[in-house]
Image (cartoon, helix red, strand yellow):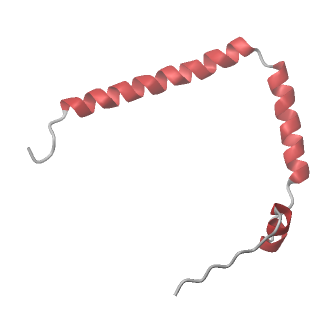
Amino acid sequence: MKLNIEIDMSPEEARRLMGLPDVTALNARIVEELGKRVAQADPEIMMKAWMGGMEKFQSFLWDAASRVSKDPKPGK
């Protein structure tokens, strides 16, 4: 037997139904603070930090691929 139940409600109504707290004010404060920090940040420093992480990730992928290609396949 298959039973489908469709409930038409807003996200606010669903939050209340599940008993979740209202974090709208907290979210607004966090977004405001992040906006201030991004506005004050040096774009060059941010890009270096992000690209450094990308280079490490790319190196990790290359190392993993080379290890896999060197290992003999199981069962052969």
Residue drawn 26% across the image and 30% down it: 67
Residue lying at the far top of the rendered structure = 44
Residue lying at the far left of the rendered structure = 76
The quadrant of the rendering that contains the C terminus is top left
Residue drawn 49% across the image and 20% down it: 55
Quarter of the image for residue 21 reads bottom right
Residue drawn 57% across the image and 19% down it: 51
How many numbered circles does the render carry?
0
Q: Position of residue 12 (x, y in %)?
A: 85, 63
- Is the residue 29 above or below the residue 22 in the image? above
Q: Nearer the viewer, residue 27 or 8?
A: 8
Residue drawn 80% across the image and 68% down it: 14
Residue lying at the far bottom of the rendered structure = 1
Quarter of the image for residue 22 reads bottom right
Q: For this view, does 64 lie left or right of residue 13?
A: left
Q: Position of residue 68 (x, y in %)?
A: 25, 34
- Is the residue 38 above or below the residue 42 in the image? below
- Is the residue 74 above or below the residue 1 in the image? above
Q: Nearer the viewer, residue 24 or 8?
A: 8
